[in-house]
Image (cartoon, rainbow, N blue to C red):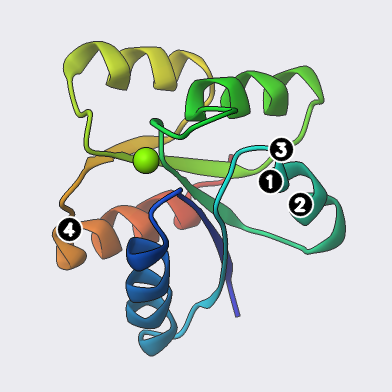
Amino acid sequence: MESILIVDDDINLCTLLKEELAEVGYDVDYVNNGVAVFDFLSRVKTDLVLLDLKMPGMDGFEVLKELQDRNINVKIIVLTAYADVKSAIDSAKMGASDFISKPYDFDELLITIRKVLQRDT
Ligand SMILES: [Mg+2]
């Protein structure tokens, strides 16, 4: 079973999305802040991270940078209400595989997740 970590300060989004993704067969967990990502990834095998950009404290861009700095190799889809071309380009430069805007369309998100998980890198 492929495993997904949701990183978002919006707890309602985390619980809903966890349920939706679990229903289609993924093993899903979530954390509500950027700092918690690194402890989680050090403990739990994770195939994909769904990462919010706008979070209090450590934001999504800082998480992307820290993942690069620590050479942590995990696939990332950025999921954010602040969808704009610049954020998409910036997050791609920092290692994100794809970009989905909130409020998300679940079918579109699922297609993107499957596509990213199928890639070799
Ligand atoms: Mg947020």
Q: Secondary structure at mark 2?
A: helix
Q: Quadrant of the C terminus?
A: top right
Give the mark toward the camera: 4 or 2.
Answer: 2
Which residue is at 60% across, 80% downward?
Answer: 1
Q: Which mark is residue 102?
A: none
- Left or right of 61 on screen, residue 42: right
Closer to the camera, 121 or 34?
34
Q: Position of residue 101 (x, y in %)?
A: 20, 41
Q: Secondary structure at mark 3?
A: loop
Q: Which residue is mark 2?
A: 41
Of marks 1 and 3, which one's residue comes earlier in the chain?
1
Say which amino acid is labelled 4. Answer: Glu
Closer to the camera, 52 or 89?
52
Q: How many marks?
A: 4
Of marks 4 and 2, which one's residue comes earlier in the chain?
2
Question: Disc 1, ligand 1: is the CB inside 8 Å?
Answer: no
- Left or right of 46 on screen, residue 114: left
Give the mark toward the camera: 1 or 2.
Answer: 1
| Mark 1 and mark 2 residues within 8 Å of each other at the beta carbon | yes
Res 100 → quadrant: top left
